Image (cartoon, rainbow, N blue to C red):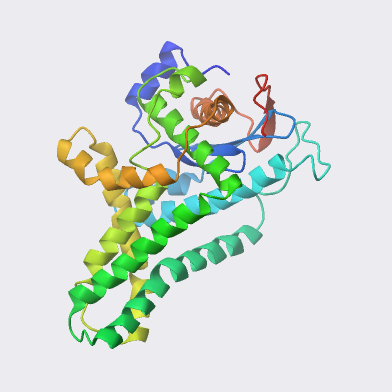
Amino acid sequence: MQGMSDTKALSQRQQTSFNYGGQAVIEGVMMRGSKALAVAVRNPAGDIVVHTEPLDARIYGGRMARMPFVRGLTLLWDALGLGIKSLMFSADVALEEEDGKKADGEKPSSAFDGPAQIGTVILSLSFSIFLFFVIPAFVAGVVDGWLQLGSSQIVSNLIEGVVRLALLVGYIWGISFIPDIKRLYGYHGAEHKTINAYEDNAQLTPENVARYSLEHPRCGTAFLLTVVIISILLYTLLPPMSLGVRILSRILLLPVIAGMGYEFLRFTAAHQDNAFIRFITKPNLALQRLTTREPDRGMLEVAIAALDHVLAYENGQQQVVDTVMLVEASAGNAAS
């Protein structure tokens, strides 16, 4: 697997704002730029199956993409949908041999099509809101009654924030013991290393990418921790309220908190050369140690393949989208 190394590509990397990101999927990585996304997945035969498609220009290049706070909500909603569809695509590819499917250059499934994905997004989002916002608010409300805190909103919201943080860290830590999640975290590490290498203008080869950090300031894990911290600060400004109203306020204010969290993450990621910014983002980077693992060479190859296809499309070198291409695997790098 060869990375982009010509002078033209390197010059463009130096001039382009750093807006690349992605996520780990089953035996693979999804990479997203400003114009396209690509999902690269290792199939049971050891090949890397890559799907590339353009992004919605209205979301990623339109007026909303330049509106602070509003852009965060639209981008996060779209990213959630794309992430779930990428996971479904990766599941089809990674399990194709068990199902008797043959890739042979054809798309394994309609994971990137159909309204059924909207229901999956809503279900996933509802579960997250219930687990990380409704339950902490309920627990804090019950504790309020036990301790008779009355109008002590600071203490009450601190309790709620601690419960929310404990649930977040506990959930991430707990699922890390699942073998499949361990591999997923390895691909997460490969994604971070590849983007770090690209943003450092390094040639995208497994040997080069392996030297880079597992942490990245724009990581989704960092976003989750940022949302928790902002929620503690914002909720402290609210007056005392009944348990029902308290839970409802948490749900209604979530878009505001998410928008603020996105802008904070965007700002701090763009100013990592500032010592104070690096200091206040240390907790975000530290939490990523729970969601990343050192990837093997095969994982790095998959992550590089995904980013290479995004860059090829955005540089006008790849015109065919919504198809699956097979990239020959290196010996010994088949998924285990």
- Whole-percent x and y of residue 332? 67, 22
Residue 108 image position (x, y, % from top left): 74, 42
Q: Position of residue 116 (x, y in %)?
A: 65, 61
Residue 309 rendering spot, x and y as whole percentages: 56, 28
Q: Identify which residue is drawn at 81% across, 41% down.
A: 101
Residue at x-position 32% and y-position 58%: 227
| Residue 32 in view, yes or no | yes
Residue at the limit of the structure toward the top, as seen here: 7
Q: Residue furthest right?
A: 100
- Picture layout, residue 106 above or below residue 155: above
Q: Nearer the viewer, residue 185 or 220?
A: 185
Residue 15: name its quadrant: top left
Pick the quarter of the image with the C terminus.
top right
The mark tally for this picture is 0
The reply, left or right, for residue 25 in relation to residue 327 is left
Figure check: 60 above or below 40: below
Q: Nearer the viewer, residue 14 or 232?
A: 232
Q: Residue at x 25, y 44 (%)?
A: 281
Residue 69 visible: no
Left/right of residue 234 with respect to residue 206 in the rendered view? left
In the rendered image, which quarter contains the N terminus? top right
* Left or right, 275 with reference to 32: left
Residue in the foreground of this view, choosing between 322 and 105: 105
